[in-house]
Amino acid sequence: MFTVIFRAKAGAQDSHYDDMVQCLRALAFDKYGCLDFITTTHKGEEIAISYWQSEQDIVAWRKDGQHQLAQQLGKDKWYLSYRVEVFELKRHYQFDVDQ
């Protein structure tokens, strides 16, 4: 399993941004096999963590035309800066009081 962490400092985000986020999220799950996608903001920074079965799925996602358009719009107006980190998940464990 692989994890992608996307961190961005927000710029001018319009209503088109929200529509694009929803579209890309659905596309990532439906076409590219995204397993989970979590987002939050902290002090003006957007943080998104996504989980993928393979690195090939991530590469295919990165090359998607709609995703590339969003990347360009991000550079042109939506973000002041961003960074992407890709990790191979070696171990996973959890605790759940209900189980």
Image: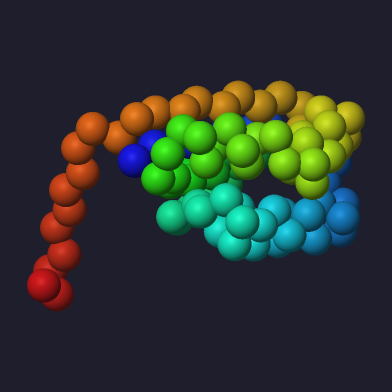
Q: Is residue 41 left or right of residue 27?
A: left
Residue 43 relative to residue 64: left or right? left
Colour scheme of the picture:
rainbow
Of all residues shown, which one is farthest toward the bottom?
98
**Residue 82, located in which quarter of the rendered image?**
top right
Image vertical order of residue 21 relative to residue 8, above or below? below
Q: Is 3 placed above or below 22 here?
A: above
Instruction: Tell me the quarter of the picture where residue 53 sits.
Output: top left
Residue 84 is situated, as x and y percent measured from the top left of the image, at: 57, 27
Q: Tell me: residue 21, above or below residue 58.
A: below
Picture residue at 44% right of the left edge, 45% below the top: 52
69 and 14: which is toward the camera: 69
Residue 68, horizontal then vertical, whole percent: 78, 36
Q: Residue at x 17, y 53 (%)?
A: 94
Report the quarter where the N terminus lies: top left
| Total marks in image | 0
Q: Is residue 3 above or below residue 27?
A: above
Residue 65 locus on image (x, y percent): 79, 41
Q: Looking at the figure, which quarter contains the C terminus? A: bottom left
Q: Is residue 43 visible?
A: no
Q: Residue at x 14, y 58 (%)?
A: 95
Q: Is residue 80 visible in the rendered structure shown here?
A: yes
Q: In the picture provided, is 55 more to the left or to the right than 79? A: left
**Residue at x-position 57% and y-position 51%:** 32
